[in-house]
Structures are given as C-alpha cells and as structure tokens.
C-alpha cells in the first residue's frame, strides 16, 4: 500500500516532468531533432595530456622523488594539474600519503610475502590452541 510520502513523490515527479518539458520548448525541440546531445563531437583541442610519453615521464619523476608535488610536476611538464593528478591516481595508481606518492596496489612480491606471513600466523595460532 502506498504511503502519503510515496503519493507526494509521484505527484512531484509528474509536476517536474511537465514543468521541465514546458520550461524551454526550444530545448525540447532540439532534443527531439538531435537525440542525445551529450555525446556529440565537440570543437576544441583534443585531450592529449595523458600520452604514454607523459605517463612515463611523470612515473620516472615520481620514482626519483616521492615527495614531488603536483605543482612541481605541472611547472616542469607544462600540462595542467588536473591532468597530472589523473595520471598519478587513475593511470599509475598512486595515492598521496603524508606528502609522498605511494603505489596503492601491492606488487606480486608483496602479495606473496603477505600470504606467507598469514600462513605462518595461522599455523602459530593452531599450535597455540592445541598446546593450550
């Protein structure tokens, strides 16, 4: 059974739909003619900051100095700070922890070491329970 809040939400949505469509008839006509206008090609400079050369250069600079800032990278690379931050966090998988860029993903050796330590701890717990 629908509550009063559900009825209110349905009425509000219907009112919003009507007012949104009648608010700007030109927009409604444009959407009917062009369809989805969000994915149309846009003019301007294409995205070129995340090239493989830039990624490799940023990675080498971070490996050299883990405390390097985005502003320092921006000044030396002459690309935007947003592009540098995207390369660092999304492409390379780094996180800034206490002012240092640290790889957020574990390497294969680190995973194996963690697994071996967990197995040793589990074995210690089993022997401690048996001895007790």
Image (cartoon, rainbow, N blue to C red):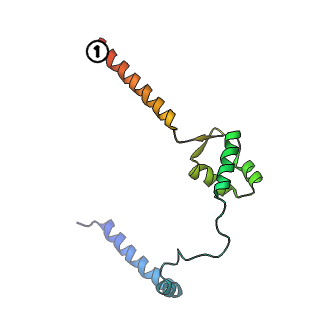
Nearer to me, 18 or 35: 35
Q: In the current view of this chain or complex, which residue is farthest to the right?
A: 75
| Label 1 element class | helix
Q: In the picture provided, is 50 more to the left or to the right than 17? A: right
Q: In the current view of this chain or complex, which residue is farthest to the left?
A: 1
Q: In the picture provided, is 129 more to the left or to the right than 54? A: left
* Residue 36 position in % (x across, y down): 48, 78
Q: Residue at x 40, y 22 (%)?
A: 120
* Residue 27 position in % (x across, y down): 52, 84
Residue 63 shows in the view: yes
The N terminus lies in quadrant: bottom left
Few, some or many residues within 10 Å of mark 1 (<14, 14–19, 20+): few
Q: Residue at x 48, y 85 (%)?
A: 28
Which image quadrant for residue 60? top right
Nearer to me, 24 or 71: 71
Q: In the picture provided, is 39 more to the left or to the right than 59? A: left
Q: Residue at x 47, y 81 (%)?
A: 35
Residue 75 drawn above or below residue 1: above
* Residue 118 position in % (x across, y down): 41, 27
Residue 81 drawn above or below residue 26: above
* Residue 63 position in % (x across, y down): 67, 40
Residue 132 shows in the view: no
Residue 37 drawn above or below residue 117: below
Q: Residue at x 59, y 45 (%)?
A: 94
Q: For mark 1, what is the residue?
A: 130
| Labels in figure, total | 1
The C terminus lies in quadrant: top left
Q: In the current view of this chain or complex, which residue is farthest to the top?
A: 131
């Amino acid at each position: 059974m629908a509550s009063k809040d559900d009825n209110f939400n349905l009425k509000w949505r219907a009112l919003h739909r009507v007012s949104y469509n009648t608010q700007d008839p030109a927009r409604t006509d444009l959407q009917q003619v062009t369809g989805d206008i969000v994915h149309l090609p846009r003019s301007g400079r294409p995205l070129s900051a995340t090239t493989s050369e830039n990624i490799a250069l940023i990675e080498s600079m971070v490996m050299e100095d883990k405390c390097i800032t985005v502003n320092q990278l921006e000044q030396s690379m002459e690309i935007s700070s947003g592009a540098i931050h995207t390369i660092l966090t999304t492409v390379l998988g780094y996180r800034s922890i206490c002012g240092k860029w640290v790889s957020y993903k574990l390497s294969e050796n680190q995973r194996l070491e963690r697994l071996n330590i967990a197995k040793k701890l589990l074995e210690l717990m089993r022997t401690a329970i048996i001895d007790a």
